[in-house]
Image (spheres, rainbow, N blue to C red):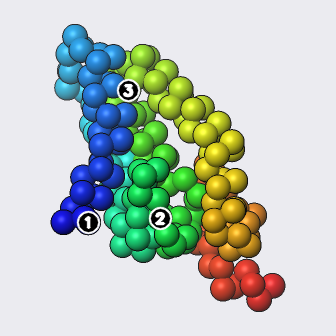
């Protein structure tokens, strides 16, 4: 039962950011069939897949959630985390960008930018120092080799880095 609550709460924040806020921003917008609609929908599906994979990794591998009241107990260095330190946030940004494209909404695009800026500040001020304190040298090495926002083309393998 506890795991069910973890899963539910793991989707509350993304749902708010991806659905509730954009609906509030564009409550009177109509959608028209066009190329930008299909490209936007594809981007949203890609972003949602990334979000689901990262939340699932937090629960399965990290033994926690994205929620501050139930943080991961183990450092997650698998899946998308081998390419970028913030795949969940990038997934959310991709969905928001897809929504902006689908609706041709400058306001949702602005919200996506604000979301990215807020998260960048949060990661620099709180998240990364907390992860360094919690996971020590493993996280420092990971941070040294994997970018916060720009994905690596080759996956990070910590065991290989230790042999250099």
Label 3: which secondary element: helix
Which residue is rendered at x = 19% and y = 26% of the image? Answer: 33
Comparing marks 3 and 1, which lies closer to the viewer?
1
Residue 41 image position (x, y, % from top left): 28, 39
Disc count in the image? 3
- Report which residue position mark 1 lands on: 3
Q: Quadrant of the C terminus?
A: bottom right
Q: Inspect this view and state whether residue 146 appears.
A: no
Question: Which of the 4 image quarters holds residue 139?
Answer: bottom right
Q: Measured along the vertical axis of the image, is residue 82 above or below residue 129?
A: below
Q: Are marks 1 and 2 in contact (CB under 8 Å)?
A: no
Which residue is rendered at x = 34% and y = 31% of the image? Answer: 99
- Report which residue position mark 2 lands on: 72
Residue 129 shown left or right of residue 98 in the figure: right
C-alpha gap between disc 1 and disc 2: 13 Å
Comparing marks 3 and 2, which lies closer to the viewer?
2
- Report which residue position mark 3 lands on: 100
Label 1: which secondary element: helix
Closer to us: 31 or 162 = 162
């Amino acid at each position: 039962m506890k795991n069910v609550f973890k899963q539910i709460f793991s989707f509350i924040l993304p749902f708010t950011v991806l659905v509730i806020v954009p609906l509030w921003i564009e409550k009177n917008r109509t959608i028209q069939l066009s190329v930008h609609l299909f490209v936007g929908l594809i981007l949203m599906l890609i972003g949602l897949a990334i979000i689901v994979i990262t939340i699932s990794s937090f629960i399965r591998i990290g033994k926690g959630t994205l929620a501050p009241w139930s943080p991961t107990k183990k450092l997650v260095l698998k899946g998308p985390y081998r390419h970028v330190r913030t795949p969940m946030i990038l997934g959310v940004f991709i969905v928001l960008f897809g929504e902006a494209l689908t609706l041709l909404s400058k306001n949702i695009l602005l919200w996506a930018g604000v979301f990215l800026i807020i998260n960048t500040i949060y990661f620099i001020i709180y998240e990364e120092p907390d992860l360094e304190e919690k996971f020590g040298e493993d996280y420092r090495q990971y941070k040294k080799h994997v970018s916060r926002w720009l994905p690596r083309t080759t996956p990070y393998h910590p065991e290989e880095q230790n042999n250099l």
